[in-house]
């Protein structure tokens, strides 16, 4: 029984990583398109993050966490809240790394993205896309 749970958790993490790679691709593409077009980097970060966030919600809900119930306001609120925390952390890290750490923009973007991803996975798994069966086992 425990081995099956480990396999399921591993599948969930792998799916999250695949979806995350797609989100990151969308995020980076939009970010660097806007940044090279002259948009301020924090504005580019906000717009690009929202593009990746939309992709994230759809694919993580349907495929990663396999939520069957209809979308409801509470779930959407949780998703937005977790992503607001993640983008806030990413903004802070990007600003801190670029302005005070003098880290190159590309490397800073990667580091900020990794920080945001950690927040979104933990929040999505434990709070946004809760599995009612997990709550009964706890």
Image: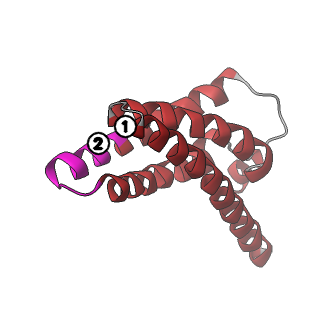
In this view, which residue lies farthest toward the front? Answer: 37
Q: Position of residue 62 (x, y in %)?
A: 79, 43
User: Percent position (x, y) of residue 17?
Assistant: 63, 60
Residue 88 got which mark? 1
Labelled pair 1, 2 in contact (Cβ < 8 Å): yes
Residue span colored magenta:
91-104
Q: Is residue 95 magenta?
A: yes
Task: Name the residue rendered at 66%, 30% in the picture.
Answer: 75
Query: Along the horizontal axis of the image, is 1 left or right of 95?
Result: right
Left or right side of 106 for 67: right
**Image disc number at residue 66:** none
Q: Main secondary structure of the magenta part?
A: helix
Give residue 100's position: percent from left, percent from top: 14, 50
User: Closer to the camera, 49 or 126?
Assistant: 49
Image: 133 above or below 39: below
The question of residue 71 being in magenta is answered with no
- Which quarter of the image is occupied by the N terminus? bottom right
Q: Which structural element holds mark 2?
A: helix
Number of numbered discs present? 2
Q: Which residue appears at 36% of the width and 43% of the height?
A: 89
Q: Residues within 10 Å of mark 2 (few under 14, many from 20)?
A: some
Q: Quadrant of the C terminus?
A: bottom right
Examine the rendering and report whether any part of residue 124 can be seen.
yes
Q: Which residue is mark 2?
A: 92
* Residue 96 placement (x, y as % from top left): 22, 47
Label 1, secondary structure: give it. helix
């Amino acid at each position: 029984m425990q081995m099956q749970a480990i396999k399921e958790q591993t599948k969930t993490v792998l799916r999250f990583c695949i979806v995350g790679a797609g989100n990151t691709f969308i995020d980076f593409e939009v970010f660097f398109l806007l940044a090279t077009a002259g948009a301020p980097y924090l504005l580019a970060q906000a717009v690009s993050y929202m593009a990746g966030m939309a992709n994230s919600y759809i694919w993580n809900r349907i495929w990663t966490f396999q939520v069957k119930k209809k979308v409801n306001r509470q779930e959407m609120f949780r998703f937005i809240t977790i992503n607001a925390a993640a983008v806030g952390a990413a903004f802070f890290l990007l600003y801190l790394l670029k302005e005070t750490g003098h880290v190159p923009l590309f490397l800073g973007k990667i580091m900020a993205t990794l920080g945001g991803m950690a927040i979104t996975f933990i929040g999505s798994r434990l709070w946004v896309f809760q599995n009612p069966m997990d709550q009964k086992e706890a």
